[in-house]
Amino acid sequence: MVKLYTPASHRFFDVLVTFVAGFSLQNLGGGLQRSGRIAAFVPSDHIVIQGKANVTDLQMVLRPHSILDPILTNGWPLQLEIDEQPLDKAIPPRFAKLAGMNRLNAIQISHTFVSYFESNVSLVRDKHGSDPYRWPEPWNFARVVRNALAHGGTINIENPSAPPITWKSITYSPANNGTEILFQDMTFVEIVILMGEMDRVA
């Protein structure tokens, strides 16, 4: 299913565009570094980003040309299309380690999510109060994700009596302190889905 993201409908549009553009250019640069030659993206080219099985069970198909072309001609995209498809294969464990390109991607994903969270959390406090346990489920869960991504990428719940929080099939509690999030429980796919749910209730 193709989803259309626009500035008018999604508060995270600019950070989403920034991640997709950076990820796409990173793919070009990586290809050039490895092979010594590279071809520009054309409209038919696509990149597939896999999500996590048993969480969203989705993969996202991006078309870099539609994002890079306006940016490289001194403009900015007016919309972003992402094709959400059923996940066709799970990420092999050897590709889930935070090293190499995965580490670079994890840093980019973290900046994307933390930037969106910090830019909009005041709206949630104004609407739902300062007690995060009274926030809508996506935002209460996102609070723990934000803290992890802002501090090394691992769960760090300081209150040992904090109740578990759940989003989809993921549950975190103080017993999960030290657990890595990215590529273990969540990828870019889950982050985008989570931001979409947060946006709808902010």
Image (cartoon, rainbow, N blue to C red):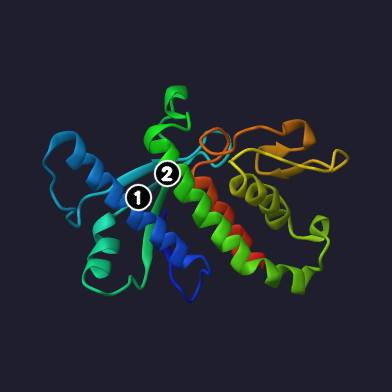
What amino acid is found at the position of numbered circle 2 in the picture? Answer: Asn
Depicted 76 relative to depicted 108: above or below: below
Depicted 74 relative to depicted 142: above or below: below
| Left or right for 162, reference 93 | right
Whole-percent x, y for residue 20 in the image: 37, 55
Quarter occupied by the C terminus = bottom right
Depicted 6 relative to depicted 98: above or below: below
For the residue pair 168 and 181, the one nearer the viewer reads as 181
| Residue hosting label 2 | 105
Residue 177: give its label.
none
| Left or right for 182, reference 177 | left
Q: Are marks 1 and 2 in contact (CB under 8 Å)?
A: yes
Q: Residues within 10 Å of mark 2 (few under 14, many from 20)?
A: many
Whole-percent x, y for residue 6 in the image: 43, 71
Circle 1 — which element? helix
What amino acid is found at the position of numbered circle 1 in the picture? Answer: Phe
Residue at horizontal 83%, vertical 61%? Answer: 131
| Left or right for 52, reference 119 | left
| Residue hosting label 1 | 23
Label located before the other in sequence (1 or 2): 1
Residue at horizontal 50%, vertical 56%? Answer: 112
